[in-house]
Image (spheres, grey):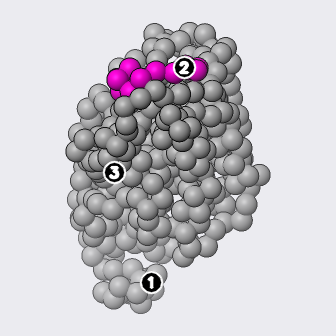
Amino acid sequence: MTTAQPDRQSLGEQMHALIRKLYPICRSLTGDGVRATLAELAQRIELQIHEAPSGEQVFDWTVPKEWNIRDAYVKNARGERVIDFQQSNLHVMGYSIPVCARMSLEELKPRLYSLPDRPDWAPYRASFYRPDWGFSIAHRDLLSLQAGEYEVCIDSSLEDGHLTYGECFLPGETQDEVLISTHICHPSLANDNLSGVAAATFLAQQLAARPRRYSYRFVFVPAQIGSLVWLARNESTLHRIKHGMVLVALGYGGSLTYKRSRRGRASIDRVFEHVLKTSGAQYEVMDFYPHGNDERQYCSPGFNLPVGAFMRTPCNRFPEYHTSADNLDCVQPEYLQDSLETVLRVVEALEGDRTYVNLNPKGEPQLGRRGLYRQVSDLNGAGKVQELPVLWVLNLSDGEHSLLDIAERSGYSFQEIRRAADALIACDLLAERVSQS
C-alpha cells in the first residue's frame, strides 16, 4: 500500500522508528526473518515479494537451503543461560546447524567468537555455505566462564525452502530506469544495514508522490546472492537501467561517501560527486574496487551497470561494524535525514538534467526587456535566480552541454542551474534540444 508523503521535517525520526521496529528481527540470507522484514516494509510501500527455491542455479552460485532459528543458548552447570539467543540474535552464528549436546568448556571454546580488543562487544559471525555452528560472546563474558560442563542448544533448521526478496517499481514517463538496491540479510545491526533499508523505503515513499521522468526500481535483497538472483531473473531488461545506487550504512556520523561505479564517469557518478561537492558538507568520493556490497555484482564485467554505492562512513571504517555495538544508538535521526535528502538531491538532478539550445545566441540577450531582469537577484532567497547562473546557462546552452555539464563547469549547484534554465525557458530564450534519433 502507498501512504501519504511524510513531513520532511520529521523524516529522520520516522526512519529511526522504522529501524527500531525492524531491529529485533533475526534476519539472514533466507528465512522467516527476511519475510517478516519485507512484510513490514509492504505496509509502507507497494512491494512485490519474489522467492527463488533452494538449489536454483544462479550463474556460478546455487541458492542455499533456507535457515530458520527458534532458540539457542549455552547453559552452565547451574542451568543459567550464559549465552542467550533471546537476549540478542547476534549471539548465534548465522546459519548454524542444529545442535543439542553437553561438553566441557575446553571443547566449547573453539566455537565461541569474541573480540579481545573490544571486550564489551559481541561480533557478528555467519557461515552461509559451509555447515558449521557457533556462538558470539563479549570477550569479558568469555573470560568469566568457569571450567565445567555446559549444555549447548541451537534449535534451528536448514532445509529446502526459498530465498526471498522484495521489489518496488514506480513507473515513470519513460522505460529508462533508476535502480536502488539495499541489502536486508543482516540480523540486529542498525547501521549495516537497517539504515539503508529505511532510506530506500522512505525514498520510495517520497518518489511515489512525485511526477517522474524515469522509472524507479527498488530491490531489497539478501547481500550478494540476492542481487545475483535478481540479475539472473532480469537479464533481458537490464539495458533499461541508466543509473543506479546501492544504499548502505547511512545513519552513522562522518563524511558523506560515494563509491563510483566500475565505469567511473557514468552520469550517476558525476551527479553524486557534484551534489556532494556543492553540499557544503564533508564528503569523500572513492574509485570503484571489486569488493564491498552489491555494487560489485551489478558492476561485474558481464553487466557493467552504472551503479555506485552511497554511504556515510564505509562499513569497514566505523568501529561498531559487524558487532553488537551497531545498535540503535549507532544511528541518529539527523544523519538518516541528511542522507535521504542528499539522495533526493541526486534524484532531482537526474530528473532535471536536460540539454538546451540558446534561442538568442548572438551576444547576450537583453534580460530586462523580457522581464527576466526583475527575477534576477544576487540574494539567496527562496526562488530567486542569480545572475551568473543565468549567464552560464545562456553561454553553454549550445545543444552540446547538458545542465549537469554547466553545473560542473560553473561550480554552481545543479538546483541553481536548473532554476536559471527554467527562468530562461519561461522567457522563450531557451529550448530543449531535439533528439536526432
Give whichever of 8, 398 is nearer the camera: 8
Place of residue 55 in the rendered image (x, y in percent of width and height, measured from the top left) = 60, 10
> Which label is found at residue 151?
none
Amino acid on which the number 3 mark rests in the picture: Asp
CA–CA distance in space, label 2 to label 3: 27 Å
Mark 2 and mark 3 lie on one chain; the one further toward the N terminus is 2
Amino acid on which the number 2 mark rests in the picture: Ala
- Residue 399 higher or lower than 113, as above or below: below
Name the residue carrying label 3. 120
Place of residue 202 in the rendered image (x, y in percent of width and height, measured from the top left) = 58, 57
Mark 2 and mark 1 lie on one chain; the one further toward the N terminus is 2
Give whichever of 367, 70 is nearer the camera: 70
Magenta residues (range): 97-111
Residue at the image position 54 percent from the left and 76 percent from the top: 9
Mark 3 and mark 1 lie on one chain; the one further toward the N terminus is 3
Check disc 3 and report its element: helix, strand or loop.
loop
Instruction: State whether residue 298 appears in this view.
Output: no
Amino acid on which the number 1 mark rests in the picture: Ala
Tell me the mark number nearer the camera, choosing from 3 and 1. Answer: 3
Name the residue carrying label 1. 382
Check disc 2 and report its element: helix, strand or loop.
strand
Name the residue carrying label 2. 101
CA–CA distance in space, label 3 to label 1: 49 Å
